[in-house]
Amino acid sequence: MKKEEREQVDILQGTLDMLILRTLVFGPKHGHSIAHSIEHDSGAVLKVDHGSLYPALQRLERRGWVTADWGTSENNRRAKYYRLTPLGRKQLVAETTKWERIVEAITRIMQPASEES
Amino acid sequence: MTGPLRELNYLVARLLNRRRAAQELDEEMRAHIEMEVEENIAAGMNAEEARFAALRKFGSVALSQERSRHVWGFRWLETFWQDLRFGLRMLLKSPAFTIVAILTLALGIGANTAIFSIVYSVLLRPLNFSDPDRLVYVWDSNPSIGYPRFSSSAPNYLDWRAQSQSFEQLSAVASWSYNLTGEGTPERVGAVRASASLFPMLGVNAQLGRTFLEEEDRPGGDRVVLLSHGFWQRRYGQDRGIIGRTLELNGESYTVVGVLPASFQLLPDRLPYAEIWTPAALTENMFVRGNHLLKVVGRLRPGVTLSAAQSELSSVAKRLEAQYPDSNRGWNVVLEPLQEVVVADSRPMLMVLLAAVGFVLLIGCSNIASLMMTRAVSRAREIAIRSALGATRLRLIRQFLTESVLLALIGGALGVVLSYWGIELLIKLQAGSLPRTDEIAIDSRMLLFSLVISIITGILFGLVPALQSSKVALLESLKEAGRKGTSGPGRGRLRNAMVITEMALALVLLIGAGLMIRSFLQLQKVSLGFNPDNLIAMRLTLPTEKESKYYQKSARALFYSELLKRLEALPGVESAGMVSTLPLAGDSVSEFFVEGQPLPDPNQGYNANYRNCNGRYFNTMHIPVMKGRIFSDQDITNSQLVVIVNETFARQFWPNEDAIGKRISFNGNEGPWRTIVGVVGDVKHMSLDQEAGLELYTPYTQTNGHDINIVLRTAGDPAGITAGARRALMELDSTLPIYRIRTMQEIVANSLASRRFNMALLSFFAASALLLAAVGIYGLIYYTVKERTHEIGIRIALGAQQLDILKLVMKQGTKLALYGIAIGLAASMALTRLMASLLYQVSATDLTTFTVISLILALVAMAASYIPARRATKVDPIVALRYE
């Protein structure tokens, strides 16, 4: 089998927060499915230590961007579900805008040749 | 909920439910891992692989938990709690160290708290009146005759009141006394005459009844009296029905209108006998402008500064000078904040004592720091392991500091308890040398001070060991043979520096104490001018109102001679004399003029200390008669006016002639002239540390005295005479009380009381410092010997004698001591001049004291080094060589 190169990208803390918020847009999820969403939706490019989600989730909860409740998972297991709050929704929009601006700026620097020609 | 509030809510909720939150997080993470495991199994892995993969994907569970808890925000609290419990355990594990440290800290912090309480209550706390910083004391001032601060005269006071705008109120008080007769034993009561405006001005209300009314403050309406709390308690048992009753004072009826509060105290060392208060009732005619007997206190008008008031009153004084040149020439006015007047005398000594306890605490801290460094050596292993497990240097330092601050807080708490007793003891010992002792107490401010000092002390002695110990030479410490890795050259130097500092601090304190002891000894050697042994004094006042049988001068003279005859006849009494003011009792100053030696200003006279007495007084006191004679029966009311002067007086005015036969007058150059009939030796009239000045004596028969002190010289113990003397007086007149009965030795001792107290206290602290410093050196040498046991063993094996080893070890201690002494001497040179005002005839850089103290310290240091050094000589080389 051909070995696919996987890029392990170091994800900054703030970016992780943003990604988590994004995955919660379509409804509450528990920690495990958040982790899977990020990995899955990124096309398996982004690999995250599942453990590092939990401090991030605590942070989000502390800021009031998510709330958490205990519920039952698909497998009848007790799990804590995280849900986006209106404040969190607003934060997501702000973060997204910021992110897009950063990406645009970096792109501009990285492709000066095409500018000049 | 708004942002920060919501966040706070979150944090508080988490804090209160720490355990549940931790459990939930745990559960959550476990569930997460289980779910991953299930998925992995579903994807085809076996159970073991599934779990392995899931765990690896999760990462470090512990790390995740810790970082989550970090978000919860009370990590600092948890680590602090952890540090605290660990620190406590470590302290309990080495009980010897802990006990020594706690005791040292308790004594050091306790002493500091006690002294600081005294300093605060006496010097810093505002006086117990309303708005006390607006209160000022008004002095009459005439520096040219040697009285830059003096009492005021009544006419001056009234003029200041009339002619100045700067004061909201001015009040006057004067020391007085009355014979209390009528019901109960007759008693001489010390009193204060005060303006009616005084109490409202100070903001003081009577605890029972009322204070004076304005209309009572004038002659005729002034037969009212206020009782002090102490007097009310002593004489009337706090009888609440006292208001409205009458007392017979000097034969007249006074109505009690009020009782003053227990806490009330005005100028305690200037008005020492304030048992009852009567209205001042002044008028200009009653008092002579040149008679300064009032103390004046005022309240500044709001917005008026002290300097503005000062300039205004100075100009008023100038006007009075021009108006009344005879009495007011050279007299100015000086204003001083009332608190200054009360506390200024105590300030130098209290500051010295505060510095002294500070030094003692520093030396104690240094010792504890050394002990901690030694202790840290045995914990090197533990530190290394913790460091290897991930503890940062900061974390380790925090741990150590928590331990030392904990130690300091425990010591400090014990110290506060000790300081309660300490303060009680000090108040008892100071015997009146400090003002405001009623106000000394340990209140919340002192406790706060104690707390802060404890924390600072803990950090102070804990920081250096913490820094040293956390510096981990990882590999070395983990080795079994960790003996060398304990004190590298750096640590040794540091410990040496600490011991040297201790020596220097101790030396400064010892020199300070030494100088004070020397001053005290000098004072004791001072010639009083009389013989204070077997001498007892008592006071008697004859009422001189018109109705009294003692109104006539001749009646008084008769009474005195009869009384003295009876007293001398008592068994055990060698001689009896009388005088208007006792030695060491203060100034009684009078102006005089010398015939043929006028001052440049003919209206200005000289000033001298002045006493009325009888001839027998000189015999009784053993005051030597240098020339001429003393008063005798030929000096009666209508014979030639005579006077006796002291040696200094004779030498000043007639250096090459005989003073006998020369004349002086009290009332200007017109006379009446008094002839000098005798010259006696100098007597210390003011206090032991003041030079005898010019002294004049006039016979009782030729002056208007009614306030006398009787002095009796006894063959044996003077106190045994008291009953007999009382009886003799009773036989003559049962209504006259004798009071203030004291032996002369008591009076002399009393005048030295303040100095003695200060000297004793400073010596105590200096001795403590010496002890601590000695312990410091002992500890260092002991430890060094232990370290060098191996080396010493080799030396002995190679043939070194006991003496050689002794010299080797003691060299270190002696060297440190010498450095310390050198630094201490330099510091003393600079610092002792600050206490120059407390010394008597001893220079602040007195060579003898410096030398002797240095020698003492050196000897003590050597002795402290000798003991462990001897141990070194007993080392068995075989054992030592095996000792790794």
Image (spheres, coloured by chain):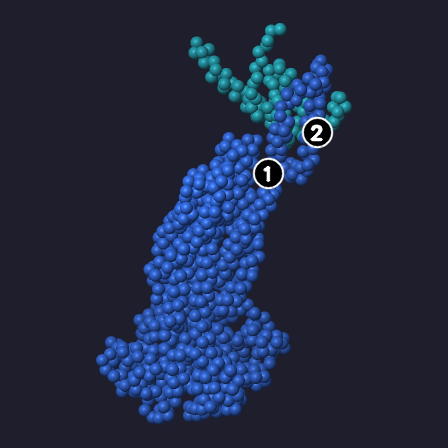
Q: Residue at x 47, y 41 (%)?
A: B877
* Of the image marks 2 and 1, the number of the one nearer the N terminus: 2
Is residue B228 toward the left or the right of residue B240 in the image? left
Is residue B826 toward the left or the right of residue B382 in the image? left
Relative vertical location of residue B695 with respect to residue B135 in this rendering, above or below: below
- Amino acid carrying mark 1 in the image: Thr
Give me the chain that's blue: B
Which SS class for mark 2?
helix
- Amino acid carrying mark 2 in the image: Glu
Q: Residue furthest right?
A: A76
Give the x, y percent position of residue B623. 36, 81
Chain letter, disc 2 residue: B
Q: Which quadrant does the N terminus of chain B fall into?
A: top right
Give me the chain that's cyan: A
Is residue B52 toward the left or the right of residue B373 in the image? right
Between B165 and B721, the residue placed more toward the observer is B721
Name the quadrant containing residue A86: top right
Name the quadrant containing residue B382: top right
Q: Residue at x 43, y 9 (%)?
A: A117
> Residue under circle 1?
B79
Q: Residues within 10 Å of mark 1 (few under 14, many from 20)?
A: some
Q: Residue furthest top?
A: A1
* Visible residue check, residue B531: yes
Give the x, y percent position of residue B256. 57, 78
Q: How many marks?
A: 2
> Residue under circle 2?
B27
Q: Residue at x 35, y 68 (%)?
A: B315
